[in-house]
Amino acid sequence: MSIVLDYIKLRQTFPIAEEGEPLRVTMAQLAEIWYCTPRNAKLMINKMEQLNWLSYTPGRGRGIASTIRFHYPSDQLLLAEAEKRVRQGKLHQALELLRTYGDGTTLQRSFLLLLNQSLGHQVESNEGERLETLRLPIARTINALDPADGFFALDLHLIKQVYDTLIAYDYKQQRHLPMLAHHWESNRTCSDWVFYLRKGVRFHHGKECTADDVAYTMERLQRSSRDGGANGWLLQTVNRIRLLDRYTIQLTLSAPNRLFAPFLSLPAASVVPADLASLPFRPVGTGPFRVFEYTDHHCILEANPDYFYGRAHLDRIEILSVSAQQANALLSQETSQLFVHTGETARPSHSSWRSRDFPFASCSLLTFNLARPGPQADIRFRQALHLLLDRHKMIDELGELRVAPATGFHERGGTGQEQSPVTLSAMEAAANLQKGRRLLEDSEKVWASLTENEQLAKWFPELRMDELREGGVITFDMQDGTFEELRIIEFAMYSVLEYTWGDDQVRFELYPDGEGCRLVLIEKINKITDHTPKDLAGWHVCLDVIEALLDGSTLEDRKNEWEKWHEKYVQVIEKLPKGESEM
C-alpha cells in the first residue's frame, strides 16, 4: 500500500478529528490500523511528517499517549492519487480507489468531472509538438490481441489497428482492396491462389514482412485449428503453401473456393512475424498502431510513423477497460464526450445528449449445395425463393435479436426508423410473390419441355427420358424398329441438360432473362458432314416449336420451316473455315 493510502486510512479511522486538532494515539494503535509492526508504524509517521501531512508529538514517559495533528485533507490526497493513476492508464485502479475510500463523500463526483475532461480527444503540446490522444473507457474486457485467438468484436477491432491482412474489404465499395499483397490471382477453378507482396513493409520491431511471414502465419493458423482454435477453419482447405520467391506465395486448396479471398481479409488472417515464433507471443504487426502497453485493464496504442498506407492522424489511443458499475458512474455525468453504449451498462438518458443506434454487422444466411442435383441448381429457383421469403414477418415471429431484413452479407447503418417496415413489407410482399411465382413457373415449364416425356413428345416424339440423372439414359426411336441410347453427360436441375448425340453432344442451358427465361442450345460437332445442316435446321425448328408451345400456340408448317432453315445453314457451313467443329 502506498503512503498516500496509509494516510487516507489513518484519516478515515478518525473522521471527526479536525485539521490541527490534537489527537491522542499510541504507536500500538497505529500499528493495528496499518496491520504492521510498531517499528514500521513509526517509520510511516516520520515520512508523513516530512511530507507536512501531519505533525507527531511522542508521549514522554510510561503510559503517556502520543498526539498527532492532521494538516492535509485526505480528500485532496485521494483525488490527487486517483488523477495520478488515470495519467498512468490505470483508470480501473482510480475508480476502485474512490469506491473504497471515497464513499459518502463528494469526491466521486469531483473526480468524474475531472476525469470526463481528460476523456475523448485530447490535444497536448510537448516541446512544440502537437500530440493527439484518444482516451476512452469501455465496459468490456480485452481478451486477446493474437489474431489467431480473436473472436470478440472489441478484440477484433484492436487487432485491425495493430496488424494487416493480405487484402482488405471495403464495405462502401463492396470490393476487395490490396493491403500487404499489392496483387493476387487464381486459376479458373479458384483452387490455386498466388499473392504478390509489397516490398519494404516492416513490422513494428523493424523486420521486413516477406512471404516467409505469410507462410508462418498460415501454418500457425492451421495448427490452431488442430488445437481447437476459433479461427483455424479459415485455412482448413489449404493443402499446400509454396514460397515462389521472397515476395510471392502460392496457396493450393483441396477444393475450389471462390470466397477464399474474402477469408484472407478477416482479422484472424492478419500476418504476424515468423522471427518471434520461438518467443512468448507479443502483439507485433505491421498495422497503423503499435502496442505500447497491454494489461488486463488497459491497452495503449501509439501511431506507427512508418506505416505503408500513411501515418495515422492520432498519436496515441488509450482503451481503458472498466466494470459495468464504473462505467455507469462515468455515464452518470452529463458531458460533451462520445460514449459507445454496447449493452453492458445502463443506457444514458441525459436531455442534451443525442443518440444513434447501429445494428451489429451480421446476418443469417441460407445456402445451397449446387453440386447436388435438385431445383436449387437453377438460379431462377434461388431468385424466386429470395423474393418469396418474407423477412419482415420472420423478424416479427422469431423475435429475439433479429433487427432488420438482410439484403446481403454485410448490413450496416441505422435501425431504419425513418421508414415503416410493416408498410414496406406489405407493398413488397405482393410484388415479390407475383414475380417469384413467374420465375418458378417459367423455369418449370421450360425444364418440363426438355425432360418430361409428355411434353417432350410435343416437339420431339422420337426421344424418351428413361433415367433423368447424370449418367442416365435417353432413348432415341430411329423409326425403323431400332433404338439408340443417348447418355446424359451433365445434369443440373432447372439449369443444364447435356447428352450424347451420336458422335457429338447436345447441351441445353437455362438462364434468367429479365422476368422470364432464356433457353440456349449448344451442339458440339466433331466432324462437319453433308448431314450437319439438316441436323442444325432440325434443332432450330425444335426451338421454335418449344417457344410456340410455351406461348400457347403451334407452329403450323414444320416442314416448310425446316426447308427454309436448311438452306440457310448450308450457306453458313460453306463459309466456315476448315477445322471449325463447334456450333
Image: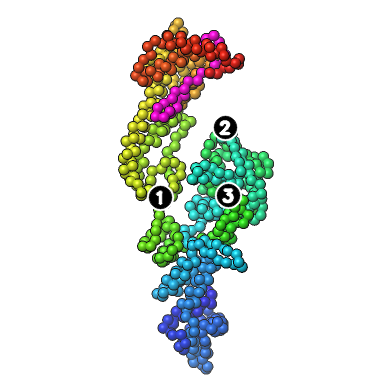
Magenta region: 509-535
Q: Residue at x 58, y 58 (%)?
A: 303
Q: Amino acid at mark 2?
A: Arg
Report the residue marked by disc 2. Answer: 188
Asked whether the viewer can see residue 464, the reply is: no
Q: Residue furthest bottom?
A: 61
Q: Amino acid at mark 1?
A: Gly
Give how far apart the Cα atoms at labels 2 and 1 are.
Answer: 39 Å
Q: Amino acid at mark 3?
A: Asp
Q: Where is residue 161 shown, x and y percent of the image?
A: 55, 54
Report the residue marked by disc 1. Answer: 414
Q: Where is residue 94 shown, x and y percent of the image?
A: 49, 69
Q: Is residue 521 magenta?
A: yes
Q: How is the image coloured?
A: rainbow
Report the residue marked by disc 3. Answer: 164
Q: Residue furthest right?
A: 245
